């Protein structure tokens, strides 16, 4: 398994790119009028980008590195984790699970459109006022937790990509996986126009590519990175063109300036809490996903509301990035310990992903999240937990009764040499 797929490598890549974009944006701020406008509107101060915040990022990274190294030193020799999945059965079950996700999402869109007089009226409303349309759709949720269903579309698409990458699917099952991958990509290029959840498309494309690389045991087809960047920026520009129809400038200009602002905003969220005393939120950010899935979020978030509200001056739009979320919740010592634990657990999952299709599918979601960990800690979100559980169930139902205890799953696959 190439080291470039490890959680530590992906974490370094994310923060290096985010740092470069932030430095370049701030260095040329006088030439970026829209970035200046957004910064002023959100009340973001560039004064927060100092040595204190940088020191914590360094400490957080070192703490994560300690956990990562501890997992590597204490890791036992990998052995096969259990029965092998039947790939054809896994493909059929993936397709059926994906149909359920799409059916729930489609019904939600259809009922929302009916309230506005039809699908065309929904599209027109999104063009005129996307924020109001988004609020209407959120108010029209079919049931509690419904948004988990369309948030899981990247997971099933990623698994489809991994099954295709084995080179073992033939005929109908191969076409089912191609359809799953294509339909989900198309759905997540359309839905964010209204819902403004463009990161779901990025999650899909990144996790699908990582899953394929994990199955092959190597990084391949680097040109797909260009496809990922093109599709994501195309969606980003399309949303800006639709939601800003009155601005007298090109959608591309709006899109790249707004993207640069979002990176600066993420870095502000990462640095600002280090510039003033804050109340620590005792798990209010890193454990919110667990609270949601255990139906305790109402109780704990109400209990922590004064602490969470006190964070308003040190956060722009969005969420805290990986290092700062740990600091905000647990303080410097607790935060460092939490990051070390995170580094240990993620490295262990990566080790399991080398021999298990189930763990590879779960790790692909984690790896994609690591590539935008400067924006949020997505792999601690309820969307990730639901997606991971769905993948585990599908692949558990696909397992054969007999196992091969001396070989990992990927060791039994014939090597695929073409990209």
Image (cartoon, rainbow, N blue to C red):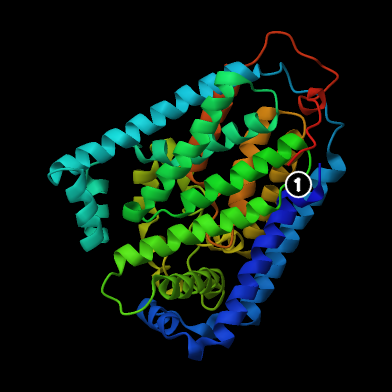
Count of numbered marks: 1
The correct choice, above or below, for 73 with respect to 171 in the image is below
Q: Nearer the viewer, residue 215 or 320?
A: 215
Element on which disc 1 rests? loop
Give the camera-side residue of 184 and 51.
184
**Furthest residue to the bottom?**
30
Residue 323 visible in the snapshot: yes
Farthest top residue?
A: 401
Judged left or right of residue 165, residue 99 is left
Residue 243 rendering spot, x and y as whole percentages: 30, 65
Image side of residue 96 versus residue 191, left or right: right
Q: Quadrant of residue 162?
A: top right
Report the front residue among 416 and 388. Answer: 416
**Which quarter of the picture shows residue 216?**
top right
Q: Which residue appears at 64% of the width and 31% of the height?
A: 164
Q: Position of residue 294 (x, y in %)?
A: 43, 35
- Residue 362 place in picture, x, y as percent: 62, 36
Identify the image quadrant of residue 132: bottom left
Picture coordinates of residue 185 (x, y %)? 47, 43
Instruction: Give the crowd class for mark 1: few <14, some 14-19, many >=20 residues within 10 Å.
Output: some
Left or right: residue 367 versus residue 264 is right
Q: Is residue 289 above or below residue 228?
A: above
Q: Is residue 396 visible?
A: no
Q: Nearer the viewer, residue 4 or 31?
A: 31
- Please say if 297 is above or below 164: below
**What residue would you read off at disc 1?**
219
Which quarter of the rendered picture does the C terminus lie within?
Answer: top right
Which corner quadrant holds the N terminus? top right
């Amino acid at each position: 398994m190439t080291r470039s797929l490890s959680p530590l490598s992906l974490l370094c890549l994310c923060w290096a790119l985010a740092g470069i974009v932030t430095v370049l944006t701030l260095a040329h701020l006088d030439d970026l009028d829209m970035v200046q406008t957004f910064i002023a509107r959100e009340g973001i101060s560039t004064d927060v980008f100092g040595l204190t915040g940088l020191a914590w990022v360094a400490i957080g990274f070192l703490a994560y590195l300690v956990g990562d190294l501890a997992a590597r030193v204490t890791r036992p020799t990998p052995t096969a984790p259990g029965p092998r999945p039947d790939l054809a059965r896994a493909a059929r079950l993936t397709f059926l699970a994906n149909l359920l996700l799409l059916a729930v999402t489609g019904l939600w869109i259809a009922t929302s459109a009916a309230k506005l007089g039809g699908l065309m009226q929904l599209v027109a409303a999104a063009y005129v006022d996307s924020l109001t349309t988004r609020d209407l759709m959120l108010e029209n949720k079919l049931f509690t937790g419904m948004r988990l269903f369309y948030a899981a579309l990247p997971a099933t698409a990623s698994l489809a990509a991994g099954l295709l990458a084995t080179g073992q699917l033939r005929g109908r099952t191969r076409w089912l996986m191609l359809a799953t991958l294509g339909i989900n990509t198309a759905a997540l290029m359309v839905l964010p126009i209204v819902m403004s959840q463009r990161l779901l498309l990025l999650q899909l494309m990144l996790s699908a590519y990582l899953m394929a690389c994990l199955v092959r045991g190597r990084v391949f087809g680097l040109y797909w990175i260009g496809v990922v960047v093109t599709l994501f920026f195309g969606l980003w520009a399309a949303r800006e063109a639709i939601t800003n129809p009155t601005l007298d400038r090109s959608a591309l200009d709006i899109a790249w300036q707004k993207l640069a602002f979002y990176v600066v905003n993420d870095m502000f969220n990462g640095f600002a809490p280090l510039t003033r005393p804050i109340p620590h939120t005792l798990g209010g950010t890193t454990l919110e996903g667990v609270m949601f899935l255990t139906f305790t979020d109402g109780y704990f978030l109400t209990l922590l509301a004064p602490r969470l509200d006190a964070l308003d001056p040190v956060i722009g739009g969005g969420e805290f990035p990986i290092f700062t979320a740990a600091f905000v919740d647990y303080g410097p010592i607790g935060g460092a310990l939490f990051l070390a634990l995170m580094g240990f657990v993620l490295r262990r999952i990566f080790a399991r992903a080398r021999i298990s299709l189930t763990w590879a599918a779960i790790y692909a979601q984690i790896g994609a999240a690591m590539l935008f960990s400067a924006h949020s800690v997505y792999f601690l979100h309820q969307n990730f937990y639901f997606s991971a559980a769905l993948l585990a169930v599908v692949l558990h139902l696909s397992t054969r009764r007999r196992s091969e205890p001396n070989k990992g799953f990927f060791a039994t696959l014939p090597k695929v040499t073409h990209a």
